[in-house]
Amino acid sequence: MARERCRHAGAVTILAGAGCAGAHDQLLALAGALKAPVVHAFRGKEFVEYDNPYDVGMTGLIGFSSGYRAMEHCDALLMLGTDFPYRPFFPEGVPVVQVDVRGEQIGKRVQVRVPLVGTVKDTADALLPLLVPKADSAHLDRMTAHYRRSRSRLDKLARDRASDSPLHPQYVAATVDRLAATDAIFTADVGTPCIWAARYLRMNGTRRLIGSFNHGSMANALPQAIGAQATEPGRQVIALAGDGGLAMALGELLTLRQQQLPVKIVVFNNGALSFVELEMKAAGIVSFGTDLVDPDFTGIARAAGLFGARVEKASELEDALRAAFAYDGPALVDVRTARQELSLPPKLAYGQIKGFTLYATRTILSGEGSELIELTRTNLRELEVE
């Protein structure tokens, strides 16, 4: 049945998740036989996107347009080892084949036409000999071209502007990626650090990316980094922390010192719970209760015996990161980033567009028009790139 669904569909798209661990070769073989673009879920990023000519990025709330379009325009969706939770991002009226080793997860998010219980590796090995390779690559070619355009736009947002202050978080994440070790372990706080990690950290088959992807727990990056560093003492471990997340786990700086764990912490310090603010904007709510009165994270780090550096301008970032990464011990780099950086999902529902309009109107009426000016100024580059 799976063979028939995939064979008769003119445009097949693969949605691949963490269940593809250990099945990279099989995934590429399936994509090649079906001429299928591969969209990856966040937990699948480290196992899917590297050395993958079929990869077209992510969809969902922290994805971008090419991943969304690849699913929107398919005739059949093949889900491999993923329990992708964002129902509004599934294509409508499209037959779904879902492979998962946990049978109870199949059909949990979307109606499934063909359920297959098993590992991705074993199921793909069984399915591949039954497939007749497709000759028509039109769908794949369109979607990979779309991905190259989307990727180019994202990369332009991360370019260096030495005078930028506060810094654009895209540039911070891209610089961390460029300077990090080839086998680095990254952890990312729930919130906007996850967005920048998803879009700018490049996986290569040896790097790891760890987060609270299922539960969405705040302040996860530093505790997870401690566990990763204790488990892998010879590897570089980098925690991408939000200022809100780090503030909730400040005591763990003492743990780093006490246990002599050389974790490197990069703080995306924008003075707000900014992902919450983005959700409020989409709902038409004026920002309230999201301001953070942050302490001097650099001073606290130094007092605890860590390396500490504060970055106010883009021109200071690379030197600070190089010094922190080279330091023989735990280190913290506190980077002042733009608060009003918009990180919009690839699909905006009518209610969200209406919500942003209401937010703008209510913000002006409440006397906070300066917030809208800052938002516009911060995102001018996005408007220029588009």
Image (cartoon, grey):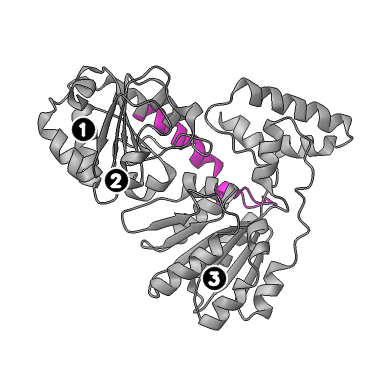
Residue to which mark 2 is pinned: 20
Q: Amino acid at mark 2?
A: Cys
Q: Which mark identifies residue 385?
A: none
The answer to whether residue 127 is above or below residue 334 is above
Q: Amino acid at mark 1?
A: Gly
Check residue 228 for magenta coloring. no
Q: What quarter of the picture does the N terminus occupy?
A: top left
Q: Which mark identifies residue 32?
A: 1
Q: Which residues are magenta?
A: 144-171
Q: Earlier in the sequence, mark 1 or mark 3?
A: 1
Residue to which mark 3 is pinned: 324
Counting from the top left corner in percent of width and height, residue 318 is at 55, 61
Mark in the foreground, 3 or 2:
2
Q: Earlier in the sequence, mark 2 or mark 1?
A: 2
- Between marks 3 and 2, how big is the CA–CA gap? 34 Å
The answer to whether residue 128 is above or below residue 238 is above
At numbered mark 2, what does the secondary structure look like: helix, strand or loop? helix
Counting from the top left corner in percent of width and height, residue 346 is at 52, 30
Whether residue 225 is visible to the viewer of this picture, yes or no, is yes
Where residue 32 sits, quadrant-wise, is top left
Q: Amino acid at mark 3?
A: Ala
The residue lying at 54 percent from left, 75 percent from top is 330
Counting from the top left corner in percent of width and height, residue 132 is at 12, 25
Majority secondary structure of magenta residues: helix
The reply to whether discs 2 and 1 touch (Cβ–Cβ < 8 Å) is no
The answer to whether residue 285 is above or below residue 225 is above
- Between marks 2 and 1, how big is the CA–CA gap? 16 Å
The reply to whether discs 1 and 3 touch (Cβ–Cβ < 8 Å) is no
- Between marks 1 and 3, how big is the CA–CA gap? 42 Å
